[in-house]
Amino acid sequence: MEYKIKRKTVTSPKKLCLYNPDRIEDTIEFFNEIESLSNNPNYAVTIDLSDLKYINSATATYLFALVSAMQAYVSIDYFKITQPKNKELKRVFSDTGLHTALKPGGKSKLKKLWKNSNFLCGNNNDRAKFLAEIRKRLDLNALPPKLITAIKETLLNIHHHAYQGPTKLLDYTWWCYFQIRKDDKGSYLSAVILDRGSGIPFNIRNELPLFEHQSDSACLKHAMTEFVTTTKEKGRGRGSKDIQSPIYSNKNDVLLIISDKVSYAYYDETIQNGKTTLDLTQAFKGTLVEWKLYY
């Protein structure tokens, strides 16, 4: 008798947002429902975005990572995606390249994205290529030096920590999206990088016995302190400072980090001590880093 895979449908909230404290829990819960079905070999998944009316760049990047990872490693047809009915959001999906990034396809599709998309993914071998592509896509002669250093450090952290040490077994260890936009504060560059690894709090607890029973927020705060390292390599531990350094050029700059059950935002030090921590009930898979830099 032929065995037939069951198809389950997961319907998105009307707004998917990892920035708004009132939306982040529902957004992560939506992704976690998809993740839980993805771990079951008896199911394929339809992601229903038909009623979606809003999605931000960080959330779109996570959706891209979740969908493309399963397409590359399991089946190009594992997900079916029902596109938004909202006309404005349809235009956003098309203009940003998200529609193309999510369409059925495996490793060949992801390779083609390097030719014309702001949604990209790769591994540690692609660091230099990635920085060159950002400059080209954004039509910039040069990226801010501190941002270059921060991106390099973030990708290096993913290589060393996200998957329990450096690995050559994964074609894709990070996913990203970058753009130049305007809002009421001016023009800004946004760069999102995320991994689908074990998360910063897990790594801190695993490597530093004093933090074995500490909260996720305590672990993340400690990880972002200069000279903290779990690699035990000489000269490491400056990464947290490098990752934070780009945001102190403009008072409106923001650095967002989400990992496991904590969201941590850094901004100008003169505003509320420069940090906002949000403890979560839903666990975010991996770690997301986003810089929003005004110029």
Image: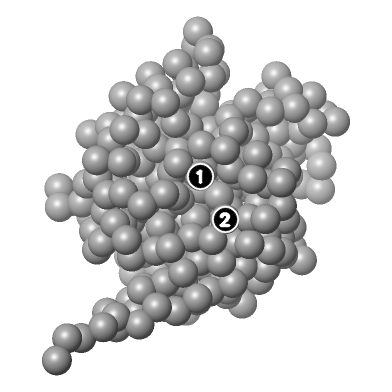
Looking at the picture, the colour scheme in use is: one colour
Compared with 198, 60 (above or below) is: above
Whether residues under marks 2 and 1 lie with C-beta atoms below 8 angstroms apart, the answer is: yes
What is the x, y in percent for residue 3?
Answer: 20, 86
Left or right, residue 68 beside residue 138: left
Q: CA distance from mark 2 to mark 1?
A: 8 Å
Mark identifier at residue 6: none
Identified by mark 2, the residue type is Gln
**Residue farthest front in this picture:** 1
In front of the other: 43 or 259: 43
Query: Which residue bears the numbered disc 1?
Result: 99
Asked if residue 97 can be seen in this view, the reply is yes
The local crowd at label 1, few if under 14, some if 14 to 19, many if 20 or more residues have their Cα within 10 Å, is some
Residue 201 shows in this picture: no
Q: Nearer the viewer, residue 85 or 40?
A: 85
In this rendered view, identify the residue nearer to me: 122 or 112.
Answer: 112
- Identify residue for label 2: 83
Relative horizontal placement of residue 65, taking residue 295 as reference (left or right): left
Sequence-wise first label, 2 or 1: 2
Q: Amino acid at mark 1?
A: His
Secondary structure type for disc 2: loop
Q: Residue 32, how many percent across, how many down? A: 49, 73
Asked which secondary structure carries label 1, the reply is helix
Horizontal and vertical percent for residue 112?
31, 33
